[in-house]
Amino acid sequence: MDILRDMVEHIRLDFDRTLLDDEDYTGAEERLHSFIENELPPEKSQEMDSLVNDVTNAMFHAAILYGIKYGARLTAELLE
């Protein structure tokens, strides 16, 4: 049971750090969308908005893959 408790603690700490990074990213994303809406010419704003959405989706998928690999590595370390 100590292994499971350690795993939960590692995941909780990593989640807390990830949440802080996510809040920073969300703020940056909001500023970028504000720039797109207010500063770019209309013909470029749609193109830029589409690009931002593509990047966001790519980051989301990368985060999922990282989580899977991190979980597998952590599990292997804790079971050693």
Image (spheres, rainbow, N blue to C red):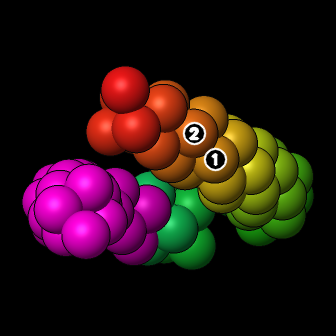
Query: According to the image, label 2 marks what residue?
Result: 72
Please, is residue 62 above or below residue 25 in the view?
above
At horizontal 84% and vertical 58% (from top left) the residue drawn is 50
In the image, residue 63 lies in the stretch drawn in magenta: no
Q: Using the image, tell me which numbered label, if any, was put on residue 26.
A: none
Specify few, some or many for label 1: CA neighbours under 10 Å numbering under 14, 14-19, or 20 or more.
few
Q: Which portion, as a residue range, is magenta?
A: 1-30
Task: Indicate the amino acid at tag 1.
Answer: Ile
At horizontal 57% and vertical 61% (from top left) the residue drawn is 36
Q: Using the image, tell me which numbered label, if any, was put on residue 68.
A: 1
Q: Where is residue 32 in the image (x, y as percent from the top left)?
A: 44, 58
Observer-nearest residue: 65 or 71?
71
Q: Can residue 19 be seen in this view?
A: no
Q: What main secondary structure does the magenta stretch of the protein show? A: helix
At horizontal 17% and vertical 62% (from top left) the residue drawn is 2
Give the Cα separation between the discs numbered 1 and 2.
6 Å
Cβ–Cβ under 8 Å for marks 1 and 2: yes
Task: Indicate the amino acid at tag 2.
Answer: Ala
At horizontal 43% and vertical 62% (from top left) the residue drawn is 29
Secondary structure type for disc 2: helix
Please, is residue 8 above or below residue 80 in the view?
below
The quarter of the image holding the N terminus is bottom left
Secondary structure type for disc 1: helix
Front position among marks 1 and 2:
2
Please, is residue 56 above or below residue 72 in the view?
below
| Quadrant hosting residue 46 | bottom right
